Amino acid sequence: MINSAFAAWLIIYTQNHAGRGPYGRGILIDAHWGWNVFALLLMGHVTFYVAHYACHKIPLLWQFHRVHHSTQVLDSLSTSRFHIVDKTTFAAPYLLLVTYLQPDPTLTFLFISFNDFWGRYGHGNIKDPHWLGYFMSNPKFHRWHHSNHPEAINKNFSAEFNFLDWIFGTAYYPREGIPDRFGEANYTNSIFVQHYLPFVDIYNIAKNDGITALFKKPFGKPNSSEIQSKSATENSKNSERIAKEALKD
């Protein structure tokens, strides 16, 4: 609700202080509600898909997104297990677009509220009809995204509606079976260490493998969970121990 209210306020503020302008600024202010709904859905899904795809393909971004994927127990509370940098990566492009195009604030509030609800629902331990996963990212569809099963790695990036996964060939949704292996056993569950550890891992990758290693996946490693270099993996446990000792002090 806070996210929805902030986005709606941002649009109202922009409309009152900027309004229409060149290059399509404020083009949705007086547009039909149908165009507003279409624009909100399109902007939301494209920005989410691209940001999500990038977080799995670019090692620098993966270190932050890894916090979300590290949980071994997948449920509705998993949507709260995020690094603040990761949340910003997903939210910033969408907020920039709605601020510039200025869709209806009420519809924006409703769409983002629905987005937040579906995030909880999609991560939940809920059994719903299999057919729903062919056009929406239901719990079973999204559980494959979180799974450690090799065939499902780097699949199912979509938000609520999963048409972009089907279009770009990143959908994985078998009729039989439900994934049962998630996360990383050795990753910390401390929210404080979770916000510190990615920076340590990024430093270790840059130090041992060079700055460029943060922007390209290591050769021969198709698994997103293996993006972290060997040197960073070896230092991860030590980094966590150091961070915990620092917090105690």
Image: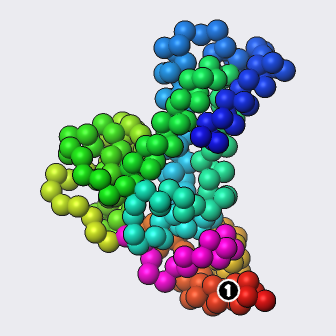
Indicate left or right for 121 with 127 as reference.
Answer: right
x then y, percent, for residue 160: 41, 40
The location of residue 64, given as percent across then percent down, is 60, 64
* Residue at the extreme right: 17
Using the rendered image of the protein, determine whether residue 168 is visible from the camera's viewpoint: no
Q: Which quarter of the image is occupied by the N terminus?
A: top right
Which quadrant of the structure image shows residue 162? Answer: top left
Magenta residue check for 191: yes
Q: Is residue 122 visible?
A: yes
**Residue type highlighted by circle 1:** Lys
Q: Where on the picture, by quarter, is residue 95?
A: top right
Q: What colour scheme governs how the chains and residues are painted in the rendered image of this protein?
A: rainbow
Eyeballing the image, is 86 above or below 59?
above
* 148, 167: nearer the viewer: 148
Image location of residue 20, percent across then percent down: 76, 14
Question: Looking at this rendering, what residue extends furthest in the front direction?
Answer: 1
Relative to 216, say whether 174 is above or below: above
- Which residue was labeled with disc 1? 244
| Picture residue at 84% right of the left edge, 21% below the top | 17
Task: Name the quarter where the C terminus is drawn.
Answer: bottom right
10 Å neighbourhood of mark 1: few (<14), some, or many (≥20)?
Answer: some
User: Which residues, given as a range, are shown in magenta?
Assistant: 182-198
In the foreground, 114 or 170: 114
Which percent across, then down, holds residue 232? 60, 82
